[in-house]
Image: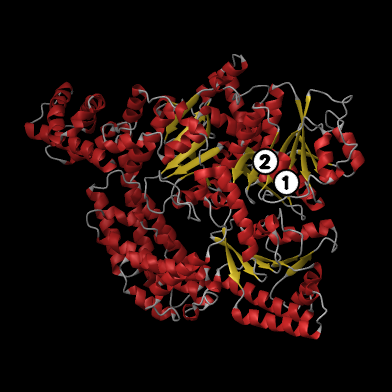
Amino acid sequence: MAHNENSRVKIPAIAHLTRLGYIYRPLKQYKGEICPDTNIFRGLLHSAVNQLNGRKLSVSEVDHLIEELTIKLANDDLGRAFYKILLDGIDGLRIIDLDDTSRNTYHVVTELPYRNGDDEFRPDITLLINGLPLAFIEVKKPNNRDGIIAEHKRINSRFEKKIFRRFANITQIMVFSNNMEYDDFEVEPITGAFYASSSYEKLFFNRFREEDPQIQTMIPVLQEFAEELILRDNNLASIRGTKEYQTNLSELTPTNRILTSLFLPVRFLKLLKYGFAYVERTDKDGIKTLQKHIMRYPQFFAMLAIEKKLDAGIKHGIIWHTQGSGKTALAFHNVHYLRDYYQRHGKITKFYFIVDRLDLLTQAGDEFAARGLHVEKVNSKEEFIQNIRTIGTANNTGEDTITVVNIQKFSSESIVRKADYDVNVQRIYFLDEAHRSYSPKGSFLANLMASDREAVMIALTGTPLIGDGYNTKDVFGEYIHKYYYNRSIADGYTLKLIREGIKTEYRTKLNAVLEELEARKGSLKKKDVYAHPKYVSALVEYIVDDFLRSRIAMGDPTIGGMIVCDSSDQARMVDQELKRYTEVSHVLILHDVEDKETRRGYTEDFKKGKIDLLVVYNMLLTGFDAPRLKKQYLGRIIKEHNLLQTLTRVNRPYKFFRYGYVADFADIRAEFDKTNQAYFKELQAELGDEFQRYNNIFKSQEEVEQELRAAQQKLFLYATDNAELFSQQITALDDKQELYDLRKALETCKELFNLMQLFGYEELAQWFTMDNLHALLSEVNNRINLVNLKEKLQDSEDMSGILNIALDQIEFTFRKVSEGEMIIADQYQETLEKTRQELERSLDPKDPEYITLLEELKRIFKKKNIEELTADEMKEQIHEFERIRKAAAQQNLRDQMLCAKYGGDVKYMRTHKRIKASPPPIGSDPVIFDILMGVKTAADQKVLKNQRIMDNHAYFTREIMPTIIQSCRDNGVQPSMEQVKFIDTCISGEYFAERNWTA
């Protein structure tokens, strides 16, 4: 597998990086030069620091500098102290030039060990700037088992370990690719090329979609000498002429595209300087959390688009980015970017973030402060008048400043007067939620526009006003950049929604209550009817029942819900009614209930999972971000852009959820269709042919019914109401595709459980209880794992296939379950995993000793089905696994030592072993080594200079035979013709096996 990944992804990727300007260097050139604690290349950093700073530092001075960096990198700060050094330098020395690409050195190496004691990992590719390992790339071959998920889990487990803390802190960008196009319907990243920044917990894998077609024109041709060095150093000269290798050298493969987008030096430096944010929050209990965020690609291209508009003399425009796309983060990144942009033009910048509600002012201020900006909040019109007329800022912390202000603080007096005007000051306004409170008929907007006629105004909105009357473009100008919700869903930043209508029996019950109330009090206003205790009682009964059922159906007791009420009066009544239900906790959020700090504490508690349900009317419908909020109960029709804002409260990614759910009491379909159609028309006018990429934010009724029909058909014959009988039925199945289809049908039923009866699938709904759905899924997953294992055990051609089964994912069950047995089961899985890993490290799968060990493993597995093992049987097998592991470890060590003698070339290591094992011996180990090294040098040179030699096995064999004879004679050996032919057969077989297998 390693060879396959080498030829199909890794080696072409390294070659492509040399096109981008990186110099490939074999690690053997840097023995003793690499700091083991940080992987900093001392010599490269030494030269760069002297060149950047015009200094002549000695070796000892640079060693001292590296010691200081090592201390900083040991912090539990996600590398924040080191990142500050990248930006500002250390002890008056700059270690990187983030503005001028020509003043740095760029290198690429492969298989650099990230080691601490006995623990290590080796990224496939590491990128160095000035000797600093700032990025690494992990690659897999296309259609690999588990896709990128395995890499996701692996890097999470590595970086959560303190032993790798310095490596996590120095690494700025990671790329993970299996060289496939994205599947836009995946919840977990499985196929594609993804990028991430460091985390000690769970990394978020970002997609990158290039928006600048001109970037491909910046790539020069691959230099022959660079390619030869890469192939020779990786002992893969044989693949150079293969069509597969040549295909994967293309600049347009998924891996090479993302490498260009992120690591073209001008891009890499821009991302390093402007693309990161350290987000530090302190909760009400004083507990701090720190995250490192990397800029999302739509934010990056929006930043470049703003610069392009400014270069063209256009100072007003709209960023149309959907809800959940990170507009506050976008403003943060642009504070730094535009500060430097105007500094190059000799101007001082003043930044303003304008909101239209007090709660958003607090929220935005907190977000900017969490990212490290100094935030000035304006509390009165008088304060703002003083602020707008001041050139500088009261901030002396060294942090960039942003003023967060409510638009209502703009008055006719908050205007830069000509007498006060300083041409060296550039004010930049970011207008949040630009679809609200900016009517040209009102005075607020007029005062805003008049405050500084030369100001840059960037309107931020996920739902611009369009259609009849005034629209957002009329006020703020054309769109600077667009990122609509369907692209956000495809990128995994937001989820698609499922609208759940109300079950017929409950809707009938609610309607009966309404009819009774209206008959009794015909003059009663509609909002009073909906707030009546009798109606609210039936409403809350349904919500609580549905919410608890949803937690079971979704298999997650941590999800939260939001009840959007028809009026504030109804919200208060819902609050009172919910107090009768001890099964759920809730809190009421209204502007006149409790004070601001108390409400803020409630929302924090909800985000942490301490509160089950939020009861709201108008608050928290925009800007509120709580990933665990997955269920919304919509009790009123919300108009136009506000509807999309409200619905998208449940669209944030959370665990492995594919959807957010909206229980629709108000029947919003007509209003949603009208709003959505208006946006589609606007998009069609803006995007032209690209418009086809966009569709409904909701999963359509047709899609739901199609999936339910398919599930019903697939499950028809199975006893889904009896988990034991179901288990017996699938035990007879060996067809993996049937099992995969069965799993998909069960997952569909889990996700769409509440819609079965609504869409007329009562019979399907009766086949399950919510409790047994998860048990059925578990049975199917276990069966799939066991079928995979059986297939590999029966594969006599490739016994190593056993090693590729995720045996530790099989759930072990016992007739008698005790704590002691579960400990043994854990030990069993751990020992088996260690044995698997050790066997998987083998460099010589055809070695008789290796085959014997695999046969022993096969014998163990064939004794009894894994899920039927008793605790005593597990103990016995643990000892056998450990014996196999130790034997494999000894053999691996011998092979690795021999392979190192041949510069890591496994072909010649294996040939050496075959010659030594074949009587009569041609010589001692040193003699065999000297002979083969002579052959290797000549053979690799022949292959690199004439790839046609590899087109014909017999021709290649004839070509290297004289080389073998001459090398033997040079080392004092007179071989027999049988010995020469044997060596020739071994070597040529290795070259062609490498070429064909890797291809």
Quarter of the figure with the C terminus: top left
Q: Percent from the top left, x then y, of residue 385?
A: 89, 36
Kindly identify which numbered label has been placed on residue 318: 2
Instruction: Please give left or right for residue 166 compared with residue 238 in the image.
Output: right
Q: Secondary structure at mark 2?
A: strand
- Disc 1 crowd, CA 10 A, few/some/many (<14, 14-19, 20+): many
Q: Which residue is mark 1?
A: 434
Q: Residue at x 32, y 71 (%)?
A: 733
Instruction: Please give left or right for residue 492 compared with residue 636 in the image.
Output: left
Number of numbered discs visible in the structure rendering: 2
Mark 1 to mark 2 CA distance (whole Å):
8 Å
Specify the amino acid type for callout 1.
Answer: Ala
- Disc 2 crowd, CA 10 A, few/some/many (<14, 14-19, 20+): many
Q: What is the quadrant of residue 341 in the picture?
A: top right
Specify the amino acid type for callout 2.
Answer: Ile
Q: Secondary structure at mark 1?
A: loop
| Viewer-side residue, 892 vs 270 | 270
Q: Residue at x 83, y 56 (%)?
A: 596
Whether label 1 touches label 2, CB < 8 Å: yes
Q: Percent from the top left, x then y, of residue 440?
A: 79, 44
Residue 32 appears in the rendering: no
On screen, residue 892 above or below 987 = below
Q: Residue at x 69, y 40 (%)?
A: 331
Q: What is the quadrant of residue 645 in the picture?
A: bottom right
On screen, residue 683 above or below 730 = above
First in residue order: circle 1 vs circle 2:
2
